[in-house]
Image (cartoon, rainbow, N blue to C red):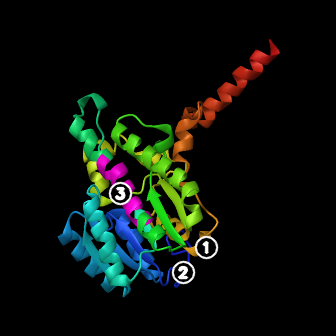
Amino acid sequence: MSYTEGMLKEDALKGKTIIITGGGTGLGRSMSKYFLQLGANVVITSRKLEVLQNTAKELENETGGKVLAVQCDVRNYEEVENMVQETVKTFGSADVLVNNAAGNFISPTERLSPRAFDTIVDIVLKGSYNCTLALGKYWIKEKQTNKTVLSIVTTYAWTGSAYVVPSACAKAGVLSMTRSLAVEWAKYGIRMNAIAPGPFPTKGAWDRLVPGEFREKFDLKKQVPLRRAGEHQELCNLAAYLVSDFSAFVNGEVVTIDGGEWLQGAGEFNLFDEVTSEQWDLVEQMVRKAKSE
C-alpha cells in the first residue's frame, strides 16, 4: 500500500450524495473523483458552467458514477438554495456538503482595495456560511439525520499569516463556524469538521498564488519538514474518511495535513534546522568550554 492509493473500501460512500463547491477543478475535482470511486453521487458547483459540465462528463467516464453540474455563485443565497433543490430533485437527497470553493492572492495588505478584501471574504466565509445554512435548514426542517459538513480551511486560520490577510480572516471565520455549529447542530444529527491542508499544488490556483519567478525563490516544499508537497490522494483519503460513517464520532475537529509545515514555522528555534553537522560540532565544543569555565 502507498499514500498515493485509495484508503477506504470501494463501497464506503455508497448511497451518499455529496455536494462539493468549487468541485470542477483542482482539489475539488480530485475529491469528487475519489468520492465517486467509493460509490457516492456527486454534485459539483461553481460559477463556470462550461467547466463544470466538461468535468462532470470526464468524471463520469473515469468512474462510471453519476455527477450533477450546477452553476452556483456561493455568494448568492438564492443560487445556493436552487443548488440544494436541484440536488434533491436529481438524487432524492443531499447527505454531505464540502465547502471547498475559495479564492486567494498574495499581496501586501496596504496595496489591497476594500473590494479585493470583500471578494475573498465573500467567497470563502460568506459562501461557506450560505451553503452550510441552506443545507442545515433543509436537513433540520425535513428531520434528516446522519448529515455532514466538511470545510477546507488552512493552518493559518488559527495563526494568521502575513500577505494573505483576507484569506486568513475568512478561513478563521469558517473554522469558528465549524466548531460553533458542531455543538449547536449535533442534536439534529449533523456533524461539522474541517481539514487544514498544507501545500497541495494544483495547476491553476498554485500558478496564480505563487507566480513562476517566485516559485523557485520561495519553494514552499522547503518549509515542510518532510521536504515534499502533499499528494492529492492523501487529502482525498482524509476527506473521504471524515464524510463517511467510519468517522461518526468525529465532530467539531480540524485535521491538519501539511507534513509538519505549520509546526516548523511556529517553533522559536526551528531555524536551526539549517545548521550543518560540522557547525553543530562547533556549537557543542563552545557549550562544553562554557561549562568548564
Residue at screen point 52% across, 60% down: 192
Disc 1 target residue: 246
Disc 2 target residue: 12
Task: Work out whether residue 71 can be spotted.
Answer: yes
Please rate how many residues cluster around mark 2, counting C-alpha atoms within 10 Å: few if below 14, some from 14 to 19, many from 20: many
Are discs 1 and 2 less than 8 Å apart at CB?
Answer: yes
Front residue of this view, candidates 265 and 56: 56
Residue 254, image quadrant: bottom right
Residue at screen point 18% across, 71% down: 50
What is the chief secondary structure element of the magenta stretch?
A: helix
Disc 3 target residue: 130
Question: Viewer-nearest of labels 2 and 3?
Answer: 3
Bounds of the magenta segment: 122-136
Quarter of the figure with the C terminus: top right
Q: Callout 3, which amino acid?
A: Asn
Q: Callout 1, which amino acid?
A: Phe
Taking the view exactly as shown, the residue that stands out farthest to the bottom is 64
Residue at screen point 40% across, 59% down: 133
Are discs 2 and 3 less than 8 Å apart at CB?
Answer: no
Q: Secondary structure at mark 3?
A: helix
